[in-house]
Every structure is written in C-alpha cells, then in structure tokens.
C-alpha cells in the first residue's frame, strides 16, 4: 500500500511548503501505531447489525419501493422534517453555489494528474470545459447558462480552487488520491441503498489495517452535520471493503482549518443507529402518516415551506436580523 508520508520523509521535502500546507501534511501523515486493525469479520457484522436495525422500519414500505439514502437526505430527515418534505416536492435545479463544488472537484482531479505547473484559473477553465461537454445534468445546465452566471461560477470556483492549491501540498500519485469517488451499499435485498460521493480519498487499507483518509472540502461555517456526513461515508466504505477509513476530515478552505476524526467501532455503531433511524423517519413520513416535526433555525431562511410556516416565521421574527 502506498502511504501518506510525514514531514520527515525525504520525498515530501522536495516541495517547499507554507505553514498551512505543512499543517495538512502533518495531519495526513500516519505512523504505524496510528493505523488501527479491525476484525476480519467486521464486514458481515456491520451488515447484519444494520439490516437488523433497519428491517422493522420496512414493514410499511410498499413492495415496489426502495429507500435511497444520501448524506444530504439523511441530514435533511434528521433536521426539520417539514422542510425535508417541502424540498423533496421541488424539482432539483442546478444553481451557481451547487455547481461550484462540482467544478472545484473536477479541477482538483485534473491537478492531481497534471504533469506541469499550472495557474488555478486555467485548470478551472479546463474543468468547466470538460463538465460542459458531458451529456448529463450539469453539462446541459452549463450549455444554457447565462454569461453572468457562468462568470459568477468561474469566480467562485477559482476562489475555492486557489485556496485549495494554497493550503494543500501537491497530492502525490503515491498517496492514491481519488476525487469524487462514488461509494454505494445495498441492504435488505436491495430495498435500502446507501450512496455517497467522497470529495477526496487518500491511501488505502493494508490487509485489516486501516489506511484510507476521507476528506470533505467545505466553505463557510463548520457544523456538527459535517462530521455526521463523513461518518456515513466511513460506514459505507466499511460495508464495501470490510475495513473502515483510518481518518475522516472536514477541511474548511476559507479558514485553512483541518478537522480530523479517527474512525472507531463506536463511530460505526453510532452511525448504524443514525442510518436506521433515518430510514424509519423516511418510511413513516412517506407511508406511515407521521406528522412532520418543525425545527426552526437558520435554515428557515431558505426553506421552501417558510411562507406557510408559522413556527419558522415566529423564529425569524424573534431571533433573526436582516
Ligand atoms: S420554515 Fe423553518 S420550521 Fe418551518 S418548515 Fe421550514 S425549516 Fe422547518
């Protein structure tokens, strides 16, 4: 297995690193003792525990329906359920803030394999051109987007990607960097699907010894939900290969701030309970006649149910300034 090497490794000292890049490298580097070993039967145990916890919730699910869970949907259903239902009723539309993530991830992917030095705007332009050429959602949207939206998207993407280049050491091919890696697990005879797309993964397991690091890049404020998102990925990856990632990390580009978490059996157990509870809520909301709860907070500002929601309006009247 290729290792993510520490600062004392000669291969990492060819590049002059600024303090932010050095901090990332220090976080990523692992000694042998930092790589826990997991039991060889972890994979079937996790699957059995998850299916046992989920199955009672599937009684109310019609036989021709399945439950699809992404980190986004799982987070929604553990928040304000009325907001979740209102958002589900809306058609998905690409918008500049959503498209920014895809463009930046594409630029990171190109940067990993780019053989020459580059300027961030040129790789963002290359990423935009490649995404626009694709025959699918984002490609179609880019083909018809206005010049102003495209300019705004480019500006935001250049900002985020430049911060990435400033704050991260150049990713070495030996670290096995993979961007936008899709993870999927099917449970309960395919009736429940767990689906994820990892911003960046580095390293891999060696036998039963964990070695992979999963990173989500963020702009803006850190939220407890970000940690839950990563734990969801760790569970899917453990279901896939039988060894969970060694480390999960949210990286906040605006602050150049790395928030790591080691993965333990307890992390996986907690996540199994959260996933099973999420499946239960989804099935009850769709088919069990559950009255959705209303949890007011900052998301009321962009909630599609806001105009008809007394709870959200009262909350904003009390706590929000403009
Ligand atoms: S406005 Fe707030 S409380 Fe009301 S549904 Fe939306 S998020 Fe929930």
Image: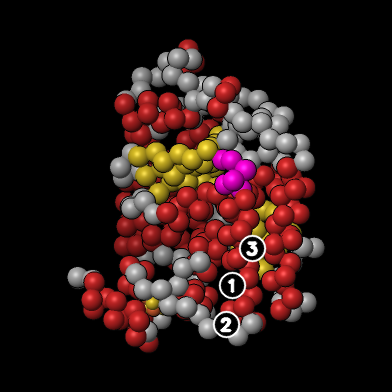
Residue 263: x, y in percent? 56, 40
The first of marks 3 and 2 along the sequence is 3
Q: CA distance from mark 3 to mark 2?
A: 16 Å
Rendered position, 9 above or below 276: above
Quadrant in which ligand 1 is drawn: bottom left
- Residue count near mark 2 (Cα–Cα under 10 Å), binned few <14, some 14–19, many ≥20: few
Which mark sits nearer the N-terminus, 2 or 1? 1
**Which element is circle 2 on?**
loop
Q: Which residue is mark 1?
A: 281
The answer to which quarter of the image holds residue 66 is bottom right
Residue at disc 1, secondary structure: helix
| Type of colouring | secondary structure
**Quarter that holds the C terminus:** bottom left
Question: Label 3 vs label 1: CA separation?
Answer: 9 Å
Q: Mark 3 — residue? A: 276
Q: Which residue is mark 2?
A: 290
Q: Which residues are magenta?
A: 263-268
- Residue furthest to the front in view is 266
* Residue 185 image position (x, y, % from top left): 70, 54
């Amino acid at each position: 297995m290729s290792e993510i090497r520490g600062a004392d490794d000669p291969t990492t000292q060819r590049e002059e690193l600024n303090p932010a890049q050095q901090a990332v490298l220090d976080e990523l580097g692992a000694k042998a003792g930092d790589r826990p070993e997991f039991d060889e039967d972890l994979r079937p145990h996790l699957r059995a525990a998850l299916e046992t916890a989920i199955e009672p919730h599937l009684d109310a699910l019609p036989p021709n329906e399945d439950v699809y869970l992404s980190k986004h949907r799982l987070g929604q259903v553990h928040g304000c359920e009325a907001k979740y239902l209102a958002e589900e009723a809306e058609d998905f539309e690409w918008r500049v803030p959503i498209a920014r993530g895809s463009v930046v991830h594409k630029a990171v992917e190109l940067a990993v394999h780019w053989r020459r030095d580059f300027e961030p705007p040129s790789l963002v332009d290359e990423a935009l051109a490649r995404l626009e050429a694709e025959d699918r959602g984002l490609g179609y949207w880019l083909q018809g987007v206005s010049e102003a939206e495209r300019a705004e998207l480019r500006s935001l993407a250049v900002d985020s990607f430049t911060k990435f280049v400033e704050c991260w050491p150049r990713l070495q091919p030996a670290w096995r960097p993979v961007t936008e890696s899709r993870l999927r697990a099917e449970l309960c005879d395919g009736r429940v699907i767990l689906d994820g797309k990892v911003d960046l993964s580095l390293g891999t397991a060696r036998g039963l010894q964990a070695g992979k690091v999963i990173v989500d890049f963020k702009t803006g404020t850190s939220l407890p939900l970000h940690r839950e998102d990563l734990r969801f990925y760790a569970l899917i990856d453990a279901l896939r290969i039988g060894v969970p990632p060694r480390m999960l990390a949210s990286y906040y580009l605006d602050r150049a701030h790395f928030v790591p978490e080691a993965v333990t059996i307890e992390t996986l157990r907690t996540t199994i309970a959260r996933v099973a509870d999420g499946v239960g809520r989804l099935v009850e909301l769709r088919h069990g006649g559950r009255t959705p709860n209303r949890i007011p907070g900052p998301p009321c500002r962009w909630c599609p149910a806001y105009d008809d929601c007394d709870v959200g309006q009262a909350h904003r009247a009390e706590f929000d300034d403009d």
